[in-house]
Image (cartoon, helix red, strand yellow):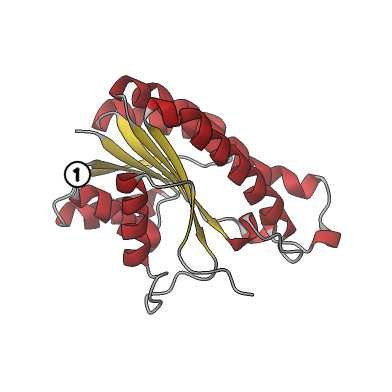
Amino acid sequence: MTTFALVGAGAGLGLATARRFGSAGHTVALISRNNQHLDDLTAELTRDGIQARGFTADVLDIESLDAALYAAGTSLGTIEILQYSPVPRGDFMKPVLDTSADDLDAPLGFSVKGPVTCVNAVLPGMRELGRGTLLFVNGSSAVRPNPNVAGTSVAFAAESAYARMLHDTLAPENIHAAQLIIPGAIRPDAEHSNPEALAQRLYDMHDKRDGFRHYSEPLPD
């Protein structure tokens, strides 16, 4: 049995995606910096008959992130699918003219160093399996820079470039990298951007392996 590792586990999209991959037979590794949050999510998945375990890490702390993924792979099974979808902090979203060079340190750590750490941690196991999936979830500023949220616009664009390079480089090894862009808010009443619909979309990206970038909704004009 292989593992679905979710970096940025939350009660909305994270829980829905963990449930979808867990119901397909994968063990689930939930990674978050909040222990109580992890306990609650793990208990809910366990009630659904899904084998899940939480691992504490902060995506801005490379050592803790690397340790969490190592522990997940050794205790639950090789990580076959990685989803990187932590929610950016509010202080990443300053207007462009109010953004200093120092203001970009945390967003770039969050959206570039975090993903690079995760991929380097799981790639050996995927290569040993002979297959794998790397899923990246971003907002619209990843493809359409927004001067009101300069930090995420810069950092998401860098994450997109990294993920695209992975897609092109790893495809011959049967390791699929793909990105899902969610232009607006995730809402229970949204037809295509509710947690369950997005979870199914991410599962389909893993299963069908049809291209790099996907959109939950068209970008607004």
Indicate the quadrant containing the C terminus: top left, top right, bottom left or bottom right: bottom right
Question: Mark 1, residues whose alpha carbon is within 10 Å: few (<14), some, or many (≥20)?
Answer: some
Q: Residue at x 48, y 46 (%)?
A: 212
Provide residue 52's location: percent of width, then percent of height: 24, 44
Q: Is residue 190 above or below residue 89?
A: below
Q: Residue at x 63, y 56 (%)?
A: 143
- The image quadrant that residue 74 belongs to is top left
Q: Residue at x 41, y 77 (%)?
A: 190
Q: Is residue 175 above or below residue 50?
A: above
Residue 22, can we see it? yes
Q: Residue at x 38, y 62 (%)?
A: 198
Answer with left or right where residue 99 lies relative to residue 131.
right
Residue 114, can we see it? no
What is the count of numbered marks? 1
* Residue type marked 1: Gln
Residue linked to disc 1: 51
Provide residue 72's location: percent of width, then percent of height: 33, 33
| Mark 1 residue element | loop
Residue furthest toward the right? 97
Report the front residue among 79 and 59.
79
Indicate the quadrant containing the N terminus: top left, top right, bottom left or bottom right: top left
Provide residue 73's location: percent of width, then percent of height: 32, 29
Report the front residue among 84 and 177.
177
Answer with left or right where residue 39 lies relative to residue 9.
left
Q: Is residue 163 above or below residue 93?
A: above
Q: Is residue 116 above or below residue 54?
A: above
Residue furthest toward the bottom? 189
Provide residue 175's location: percent of width, then percent of height: 39, 32
